[in-house]
Amino acid sequence: MSQPAESTMPSLEPLDVTRGSSGPPRAGSSQFPFALKSPIDGAALSDVVVTPLASLEGMLSAAREAQPLWAAVPLDERIRIIGKVKSRILDRAEEVAKCLNREVGKPEEEAILGEVLPTADGVDYWCAHIEDLLEPEELELDGTSYPRKSGVTTREARGVVALISPWNLPVALPLRTLVPALLAGNAILFKPSEVSPRSGQLVFELFDGILPKNVVQIIQGGGALGAALTAMDVDLVCFTGSVETGKKVALACALRLSPCSLELGGKDAAIVLADANLERAANGVVWGALMNAGQNCAGIERVYVEASIAPAFTAKVTELVLGLRMGVDVGPLTTKMQQNIVVGHVSLARSEGGRILAGGQAVGRGYGYAPTVMAIESDETPLMKDETFGPVIPIAVVANADEAIARANATRYGLTASVWTKNVKRGLEIGKKLRAGVVTVNNHSFTGALPGAPWSGHGETGYGITNSPLALDALTRPRFTLVDRNSATREMWWYPYTPALRTVALSLATLRSDSKGIVEKARALFRLVGGFMLRWRV
Ligand code: NDP
């Protein structure tokens, strides 16, 4: 692996892709945490090597050394280097899709459309905008109060970022952070989920040979490694995952007073109004709920439909779901644990009066679960309250939009929500009342693929922001620099404090007040001039 010939960056050793993947333990040892079987058919998956816990401190030191050198590389050169990731991932699209298919079970079409192409778009977006977004901002300073001073705010790299990712979008999600974080000059310690280490390795390899050594390092292993990482002296933790783990991460970061960005679970609602385009709403809800077998933080997990359209809408959704092909349109669940959660939520909802209209059972050789539609009345069941993360569409009938809004908002999460209506103005009005970081009218879920659109949440969904210029608030830190070209021996406000200075201060307060009249202000101005003259005699 060599550096690009035309590189102007400081001479650094090239990236070592074996870093973090070396040494024992290997598969079969008691410390091996990885999924070893494909969720599709139980076939064996390739070997992965665990990163020893003891190597984390060394990796952090190496990242600390590499980061300032990387940040010192001119921005246009960083853009040129990171820009290469676009063709790298596009050229490996099929390989990435096959890896995702074997490892987490998603259909290859979904892998390319949902992970590869949005990543390429993300690289384009950030490479096109980062220069403007990192542009220093001059501060205007009043020359009377602050003579001959100039100030500028710059955005600087946060430093060493720990990036901890889940398994449901194991390529697109880490890259959403890696690309802007690297462009901003950070070094990254990247821990993929133990469920998707092979996809994580593919992400890591996209930077192989183009980045200086140790700017990106991969940490392969289980939750204990993630926990150790959050307890270390990193400058920022970017975490995407469950609420339960997110709270542990927040606590660990709080103890070190380190910032963290948390993108956690969701329980998205879709509100289907009586005037919705029925065909579009049904197709959209089915895709929005079942894409990635429902293992999507922004998957539709609750549908509230107005009574007058409910029978036709429910019938259409059921018909569409019954027409889906397992293994072609809908993959299996990724883990046995996820399958157990879905089985549990559906059977509990059923025992509490929910009616199954389609699906409702595990299928296939792997961790398949038949795409399911349920008619639900009460929201007081885990299927309507907790994150199910499975291919289930629970439909509840509501009397009107107000009831739909109230029920949609009665959740501890708040990632995305949608309103389906032909009346866009009304859809937008309802959208304003929804407790969600993203609201879509007549669509759902896909906006995470838009690199310019902020992705954030309310409540237990967490407070992280990915995508859009707002993501840089976590990935960079502001530095304000002031230069004073004033050659006077003292500033007016420096020592000694004298009666004249008191006069100046009080006169300024009167002059700046909105409640003082013109006469008072004229007197204050007079006193100010006198005060200034006396002040400079000291
Ligand atoms: P987890 O919380 O189980 O794991 C997330 C990551 O954290 C994994 O890499 C995991 O490692 C690691 N981890 C585990 N324990 C700790 C710890 N104590 N400290 C630090 N890191 C730890 O989530 P899942 O992987 O199951 O992901 C699914 C969840 O992610 C869902 O709730 C989903 O809604 C959410 N998500 C949110 C998104 C958003 O944008 N809001 C987007 C996508 C998913 P390991 O896997 O090796 O145990």
Image (cartoon, rainbow, N blue to C red):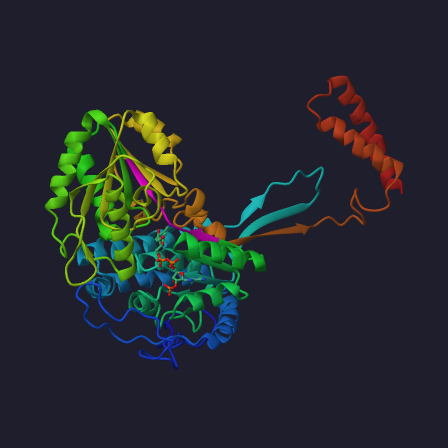
Quarter assignment of residue 143: top right
Q: Position of residue 386 (x, y in %)?
A: 35, 46
Q: Which of 116 and 196 is in front in this view?
A: 196
Decide whether residue 269 is among the magenta residues: yes
Residue at screen point 19% across, 27% down: 309
Determine the quadrant in which ligand 1 lies. bottom left
Decide whether residue 442 is among the magenta residues: no
Drawn side of residue 72 relative to residue 219, left or right: right
Q: In which quarter of the image is the N terminus?
A: bottom left
Residue at screen point 29% across, 24% down: 400
Residue furthest to the bottom? 23
Q: Quadrant of the C terminus?
A: top right
Q: Position of residue 171 (x, y in %)?
A: 31, 60
Vertical comparison of 498 with 402: above or below: below
Residue at screen point 57% across, 45% down: 138
What is the magenta range? 261-270
Quarter assignment of residue 393: top left
